[in-house]
Amino acid sequence: MTTESDNVVVTELAPVATPTVAQVPAMPTAVPISVSPGEKPEKFSGLNFKRWQQKMLFYLTTLNLARFLTEDAPKLKEDEHDIQVISAIDAWKHSDFLCRNYVMNGLADSLYNVYSDKKTAKELWESLDRKYKTEDAGAKKFVVGRFLDYKMVDSKTVLLLRNYPLLGKILRITSSTKEREMSIEDLIIRLRIEEDNRRSEKKGAHTLNEAKANFVEHGQSSKAKTNNNKGKGSKLGPKGGISKKPKFQGKCFNCGKQGHKSVDCRLPKKNKPKEANVIDDITKNVSDIDLTAVVSEVNLVGSNPKEWWIDTGATRHVCSDKKMFSTFEPIENGEKVFMGNSATSEIKGQGKVILKMTSGKELTLTNVLYVPEIRKNLVSGSLLNNHGFRLVFESNKFVLSKSGMYVGKGYMSDGMWKLNVLRSDRGGEYESPFVDICAQHGIIHETTAPYSPQSNGVAERKNRTLKEMMNAMLISSSLPQNMWGEAILTANYLLNKVPKKKAEKTPYELWKGRKPSYTYLRMWGCLAKVAVPPPKKVKIGPKTIDCIFIGYAHNSNAYRFLVYESNIPDIHKNTIMESRNASFFEDVFPCKSKEEPSSSKRMLESQDQNEEVEVEPRRSKRVRTEKSFGPDFLTFMLEGEPQTFKEAVNSTEGLMWKEAIKSEIDSILQNHTWELVDLPPGCKPLSSKWIFKRKMKVDGSIDKYKARLVIKGYRQTEGLDYFDTYSPVTRINSIRMVLAIAALRNLEIHQMDVKTAFLNGDLDEEIYMEQPEGFSAPGQEKKVCKLVKSLYGLKQAPKQWHEKFDNVMLSHGFKINECDKCVYVKDTEHGYVIVCLYVDDMLIVGSDDKMITSTKNMLNSRFDMKDMGLADVILGIKIKRTSDELILSQSHYVDKILGKFDKDNSGVARTPVDVTLHLSKNKGESVSQVEYSRVIGSLMYLMSCTRPDIAYAVSKLSRYTSNPGAKHWQGIIRVLKYLRFTRDYGLHYTRYPAVLEGYSDANWISNVKDSKSHSGYVFTLGGAAVSWKSSKQTVIARSTMESEFIALDKCGEEAEWLRHFLEDIPRWSKPVPPICIHCDSQSAIGRAQSNMYNGKSRHIRRRHNTIRQLLSTGVISVDYVKSKDNIADPLTKGLNRELVEKSSRGMGLKPIKE
């Protein structure tokens, strides 16, 4: 049936039989449209997406089509031929088409073609959501920017310009800076200046005096603030009141009639200048010119008439020496300068003054007023700024520059700025007359050292740096010298991304306010395969062009390339092109590969290698300031390992690294990891790299030097070079369980390490590798290594190693623990042994020394092993054994965290959580996201190994890693203070109690933003915690009982895993008795033991069924405990000092007694 309402055609679909669940699981069906649609939303044109999205969602809801925005298209199975299922799918597609049709018709024509290729309504809706939600965020920034603009303006002019952009068409903007581009902010500033100038021309001299409203010139306090344009045709009287100005009775200088001034004359102006000057127009025909109160001070102070002073308050340039004018025009109409003390000085003329500056350029001041009574020559700072000059005031001096070029500087004198020092190079144009002029004007002329123009301040200081970088780039790439321009531009581009000594930030960051990205930087002069531009592409022919990378585009995010070889028409060799679509080969330099060293050059090189000449190095006498790159840089310098093979063998520790390299090669050859063969046709060998690492002891000293040969497996092709890559490792909970059992039964704990573990796995695929650097077989340099066994870096290496170790252990009578595939047990009449494997580190726990020794001998016979003896450290966890206790601690790791992230030694705290600190999403200034992520990662590892007391704090703080703020960092500092106070805490396992029990707790609505609760549980064995967790619940609990019940469900899952783990432990009582879980909510316990079903709690029905099954099968039992005795309480909320200490003791977390 088809109806029409509001010009919208709505089709009602005939009901279709819905297939059963067994036929098509959760198959959507056609939904009849029975509700009349509401008002159709206006078309979306790219703005206000959120509002349009809500309207469209409401509109589709009335049509019963909204669900198709989130549903995936159903798929028909290959062997499915049921007519009902096919009909249901067709009905779904038809409804989806209707939904997509309504959304597409809600788009403007400019967007319709962009999204017309979307196949489903969900794909279309998600595309719009991804595109315009980001732009909404940008729109918010734009609104904030406009708000800040509103606060900065001092009149309504800027607002008018914002609202009426066409006003710019009627304004003539003059700029002497000759900039290529003008930003919106610059345009607004120029328009404001033009608007003020035109207003000044209209109102004349009296308007200028009114606009100034200078209280000093009328005898008022100089601290009073300016009052702009308060009333038309009036001015401030001597006592601050408003007095009417009498009508002008003089004669007009333009037409000669009385009753008005020349500025108000309607007749054409006489002697109109040919060129308009923004500054000239302000006071061209003004009788009384206001130079603000500073001029009155100038008139009262005696001074050298040859000196020039920078005056930021003056509105015109003023000179008292007629000889300094290069052009002069007398003024005889009685114009005067109005002083700050109500006195006036007559203007005798105006003209042009030329000041010679240090760089050889001339600073020309136009329309300079000649006032003989002025004691000091004034340069108007505001006029200089309007003409593109930049005045920077620092302490008691100023620096004048234009377009980044240094012009001059001066120092404050009598509260004013005086041009004092000019610096230039030793060019001949700056000698004799120029020196005399500087002496006459009281200006010190400084010159640079001979042949060192780079010492001439910022004007030429960077020249040497850029020149040296250019030479290095040209030499390293062997590009011709005519590419020096591109090298200079690239060098300057890179310097802007390098931190500076003073600010410790890059110029880019100082200018843009954000850190630069370095991911797109490429090696200058390298080979690049650039995609052929689409207009030049052909179906049969090359798809790329061989080019040389020569820099970065100026006005886009593309790269610049020099065409090296081209077979494409209209793209010729040695031409420059820009493109973003390119593949870089940063170790290939086309121009460099052409050059072959001559015989004489090779002879000289061989002689240089054999001869060693000791030359005493020259030392500069100049005192250099030490660069500061922060403590992280120093840490890297202290702890950094060599990055390349040459760097390692040539370092001060070269002998140790060479020994480590030799040991690695010997292990590889002894293990028959590869065989040298000729490379088969069509195969491409993989390359390798040396990785160097210093193995450190617990006390921080060096244990050994480790060198590892790693193949570059990231170049492997899935399905050809490898297939499955998964490899398990033992859980940290399993290690704690085994150690707790060892403490209960007083078992021996030994440790072994597998040397080159990944070299033991057998490969099924054919993989070829280039011979490693530094170890090419003599006479077989062109052959490659065919890998027989796996090597570090291969994607399948971990999997192959675990399979090999698995087969070895099973063949020698060991059994796998079904809950952890990396835990192996063997039980005989003489005793039993347990082996935990974590990649290449393993713990061996046994009841009999002979069993442990037998296991070690077996492993030594099959693998290259290192016997570590009694275990003292495993995975960074220190193991301390006493007569009645086994202690796990990480005090050394706590010291490392504090030394890295709490350098200020911020004190101590008795609790890990500040209960008065309420955290939420950051809406202010962000702290370093990288630093925050690092400290969170470090704390998470500490928490997961030995410190359950900080689990809640870490869980809560880790939610804000994407955008941390000051409050979140304050929470981090609180945890670090607590760690400083509890540095020596460790888990103490004893021989009692030999019962595994758990504690569960929840905090209802711990987060008021999303109304979700927090769960926590902890299990103890041997008097200390073996498993714990603190996390936010994934569903919303409607009551305290429900939140406790959800936490009980999570605790029950872990209890089931622990029980199954104990079932595979030798000589543990079978069957394992139910694990008692203590809960402080009697309502949750009653609900768990009840078989009654309530429809109001169907959202937790699955959890209810799980708990009931665990109770009925004897896996767990539930018991009530008071909240003050629930040791899981600090895993869900912040507590006071007494409760934190009590819970820590309950989890076996106590200080270590030395």
Image: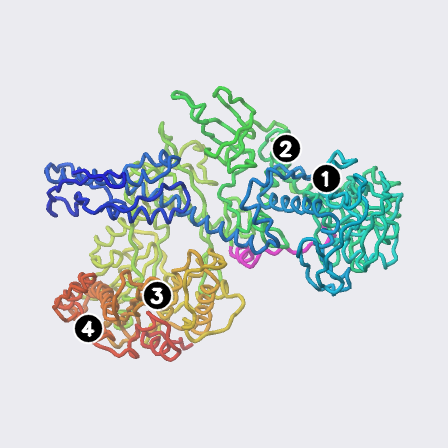
- Secondary structure at badge 1 equals loop
- Label 1, on which residue? 266
Q: Position of residue 76 (x, y in %)?
A: 17, 38
Q: Amino acid at mark 3?
A: Asn
Q: Amino acid at mark 4?
A: Ile
- Label 3, on which residue? 1007
Q: On the rendered image, what quadrant is the N terminus found in?
A: top left
- Secondary structure at badge 4 equals helix
Mark closest to the chain's N terminus, 3 or 1:
1
**Vertically, is 827 above or below 259?**
below
Quick check: is 665 in the magenta stretch?
Answer: no
- Is the image coloured rainbow, by chain, by secondary structure, or in one colour? rainbow
In the image, which residues are magenta?
618-639
- Secondary structure at badge 2 equals helix
Whether residues under marks 4 and 1 lie with C-beta atoms below 8 angstroms apart, the answer is no
Q: Position of residue 70 (x, y in %)?
A: 27, 47
